[in-house]
Image (tube, rainbow, N blue to C red):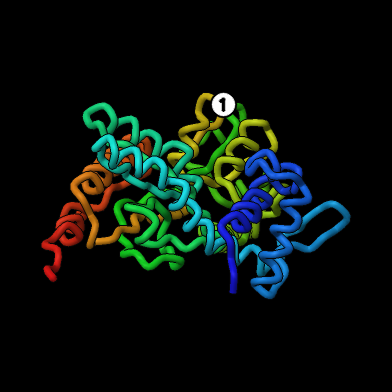
Amino acid sequence: MEIRLEWLKAFRAIMQTGTITGATAIIHRTQPQISRMISGLEVSLGFQLFAREGRRLIPTGDGLRFYSQIEPLLLSFDRLPGVAEDIKGKRGKPLVIAAEPFMLQSLVPDTVRAMSQHSDTKFAIDLCVREAGVWISRNNVDLAVVALPFTQSDMEQLPFAEAELVATLPIGHPLAQHEVVDIADLAKERFIALRPTTLMRAQIDNAAISSGGPFKPVVETASGATACELVANGVGVSISDPIVARSYRQRGVVARKLSVPLRLTYGLLVNPATASSQVMAFIRCLAESAETLGEGFVDVSASLEENLASVAGPKPTR
């Protein structure tokens, strides 16, 4: 089987832009050249990457699965020039952090800001998309920040905090006057729900049913940030991660305690064999940021230091 790097780059460019025309601006090849690359890749693989509808290219299931496997490899390839420059300039390599989208809304950026104030650590930030089946591997990242459980990984899973979900409402909404919002009352409102593929959806739905009736969503989204944005625009109410909700305070979104506690575990994916002092420092800074941004809705694990000690323990000798 022949698989050329330029074919993979063409495939990735189409996945990123949605069209061959868009891909031309990324890899600087003509449309006919890109079409031939995709055809060559499909022939070599033995399956279709795209279904063709006129000029549109729709990723097939096989195409999505293949993309989830090659994207980490291409990310590593993209970093090679920077690695070479660091080696040539005798600079340290960047700390590679992957995170789920809701963690990138506020928590990870705040942690990077805080750590940068007293460290010259370089960072590379990657996106981790659970729904796409992206496999986070110890060969790709130094650390991943996710919600647990997270099965698509060969890294060790380490919980570091518990977050209590909150009701998110427009500031002028009648329910915003309550310190505690009853889930049954939320179910009577125009509700913005997370998609069924998300980790929190089943827990939220079960709580609504136990409280008297299911939600009837007017909108479903895979993004907690999008849900909060819709709340800010007056589309409805939602249930959100507390740190994401806090980041929308200036957009007129208020967070209120729920009558039925719903919890989300913040976790880390780590590789004990390469858990450096930088990784440990980032984790401690991350925990501090989570507790501060969570404003009483996030509790850092009392056993965090003990868990970190086990991860950073003596490395096996060869």
- The crowd level at tag 1 (other Cα within 10 Å; few <14, some 14-19, many 20+) is some
Of 227 and 284, the residue lying toward us? 284
Residue at horizontal 28%, vertical 61%? 271
In the image, residue 162 sits, relative to residue 282, either above or below, namely below
Q: Residue furthest top?
A: 250
**Residue 175: x percent and y percent?**
58, 36
In the image, residue 42 sits, relative to residue 171, either above or below, namely below
**Residue 314: x percent and y percent?**
11, 62
Does the image show residue 316? Answer: yes
Q: Which residue is mark 1?
A: 251
Of 87 and 306, the residue lying toward us? 87
In the image, residue 258 sits, relative to residue 151, either above or below, namely above
Residue at horizontal 44%, vertical 36%? 106
Residue at horizontal 73%, vertical 63%? 39
Q: In the picture provided, is 190 more to the left or to the right than 222?
A: right
Q: In the picture provided, is 18 more to the left or to the right than 229?
A: right
Amino acid at circle 1: Arg
**Residue 60: x percent and y percent?**
71, 65
**Residue 150: x percent and y percent?**
43, 63
Residue at horizontal 51%, vertical 61%? 134
For the N terminus, the image quarter is bottom right
Regarding mark 1 in the picture, which secondary structure is present there?
A: helix
Q: In the picture provided, is 302 more to the left or to the right than 137?
A: left
